[in-house]
Amino acid sequence: MAVNRVSWLLRIDSDPVCYLWTGFGPLETPADAVDPAGATWLGAGHIIGIPGLQALINGVADRVNFTLSGVSPETLRLAREDKASVKGAQTRIGHVVFDQDWQLVGGITWEWLGIADALRVESRHSDDGRVRSIILMVGGADTSRSNPRFTFWTDASQRLRSPTDAFCDHVAMISQGVTRRFGPR
């Protein structure tokens, strides 16, 4: 019986490129279209889940936060130093499949592409000692403030934008299956 084990990859195209996977230790992956020479991924077994990812639908693109918890002081230092190169960097999410012996089956399947917005570093005290976290805020590749949401073309909404505009006066009388003659009666 085949056993498939899936691990997730987080690639941030910063300077230098950041390669993280949800396992422990280094992971070597073969060459693909994104990394023509292959890549070595750093085990970051404490990525707190990969959030549900969505595509651009109805002018609303997805925005997600990735949290890496339990990081070392050295990782925190590197995150602070590389913070400027992370903003605006392409961020990819993919996955790899392992067999029952934890050997790679095939290459990386890329699932999602986004643009990194900000990197936040947190360090707080807890009962177990100091807890350090890195939070990466990422918007879907289609996220843009210029992508408007759908609007309702009602007289009231149009009057809010322009009090003297009567363009939408008769919209309330329009419905599916009804023909309305415009112009003089």
Image (tube, grey):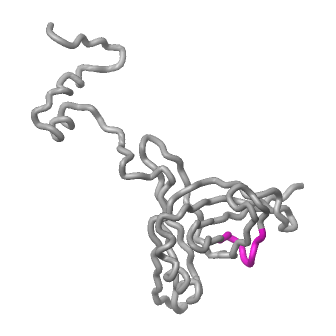
Position of the C terminus, as image quadrant, is top left
Q: Using residue 63 as the reference point, say whether residue 2 is left or right of it.
A: right
Q: Position of residue 183 (x, y in %)?
A: 18, 12
Rendered image quadrant of residue 181: top left
Which x, y percent locates residue 56? Answer: 49, 46
Rendered position, 185 above or below 52: above
Q: How many marks?
A: 0
Give residue 160's quadrant in the image.
top left
Query: Residue visible at 52% across and 78% down?
Result: 82
User: Which residue occupies the foreground of this view, 91 or 126?
Assistant: 91
Query: Is 12 colored magenta in this rendering?
Result: no
Q: Is residue 37 above or below residue 113?
A: below
Rendered-image quadrant of the N terminus: bottom right
Segment tinted magenta in the rendering: 20-28
Q: Residue furthest top?
A: 185
Residue 97: x %, y % from top left: 77, 59
Q: Where is residue 12 shown, x and y percent of the image?
A: 58, 67
Query: Between residues 120 and 1, which one lies in front from this camera angle?
Result: 120
**Residue at 31% over, 13% down:** 178
Relative vertical location of residue 112 with respect to residue 16 in this rendering, above or below: above
Q: Residue at x 48, y 64 (%)?
A: 88
* Residue farthest along the left direction in this orientation: 164
What residue appears at the point 14 percent right and 9 percent down from the top-left corner? 184
In the displayed structure, would residue 66 be above or below residue 174?
below
